[in-house]
Amino acid sequence: MKNIITLLLLCASLSIQSQNLEGAWQSGSDENHIAMIVAGKFFSAAVYNKKTGAYIGTCGGSWRIEKNQFIEVHEFNTMHPEWIGTEQKSEVTLKGNKLTFKMKDKTEEFTRLDDGTPGALSGAWLITGRVTDNGEQKRTPGARRTMKILSGTRFQWIAYNVDTKEFFGTGGGTYTTINGKYTETIEVFSRDNTRVGASLEFDYSIKDGDWYHSGKSSKGDPINEIWSKREKVGL
């Protein structure tokens, strides 16, 4: 029950200036671990058991500051899907590398993991195309979205539908970008926790602001994807 309360607290909390929140944060215990990423005006959080790899829940969306209040609009929330599309308001305290959230009689403290560096792909991205034998096949994301949000060391992807409030899956962990190689190490995977601990290496490059990503998926299937920053897409 504690992990559920903690996730709900996180999903109804946050405040301070965006440049201070940028990056990755963690809280909880090994059994109820929370990994949060803030990238620009977007955020996501995953809760899972670090010992077993068991997935617990996730939430996220966009946020803004108004009159010292942090206002977030949920795009996905596996614990409270009825919050999707609604505004949740709260306040937080930031002191050094400690971020404290308060909601009624509940307090949760987060510790900073990174400030958006050193990885080269920090930001919130949406998949906008694939490269096939016939060339690039691009599309504009709609209500059905696959987002990948990255700090300087951590990533999380989420597949969801903002209109129907459906959730299709998520995964996350740590990453590096070295010499044109993007390498993920999986810490949580909602669809198959036997993949936890696996490392996947991909080729990556940035062209005209888009992220070109190719290699093999966790199932061994070839992928050749194009990702665009959410600011560029306008979502």
Image (cartoon, rainbow, N blue to C red):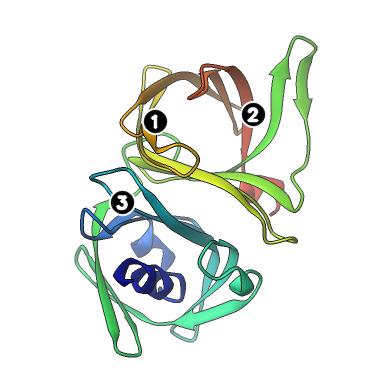
Q: Position of residue 194 (x, y in %)?
A: 38, 32
Would you place residue 186 above or below residue 59 in this image?
A: above
In the drawing, what numbered circle is on residue 39?
none
Residue 179 in sight: yes
Decide which of 154, 46 is in the foreground and name it: 46
Q: Secondary structure at mark 3?
A: loop
Q: Residue at x 46, y 42 (%)?
A: 171
Q: Do residues under tags 1 and 2 come within 8 Å of each other at their CB atoms?
A: no
Amino acid type at mark 1? Arg
140 relative to 75 in the view: left or right: right
Decide which of 41, 2 is in the foreground and name it: 2
Quarter in which the C terminus is drawn: bottom right
Q: Earlier in the sequence, mark 1 or mark 3?
A: 3
142 relative to 175 in the view: left or right: right
Q: Secondary structure at mark 2?
A: strand
Amino acid type at mark 3? Asp
Amino acid type at mark 2? Ile
Q: Position of residue 7 (x, y in %)?
A: 39, 67
> Marks 1 and 2: which is nearer the front?
1
In the drawing, what numbered circle is on residue 195?
1
Q: For residue 207, which quarter of the picture?
A: top right
In 3D space, how far apart are the residues under numbered discs 1 and 2 (Cα atoms)? 24 Å
In the drawing, what numbered circle is on residue 115?
3
Q: Earlier in the sequence, mark 3 or mark 2?
A: 3
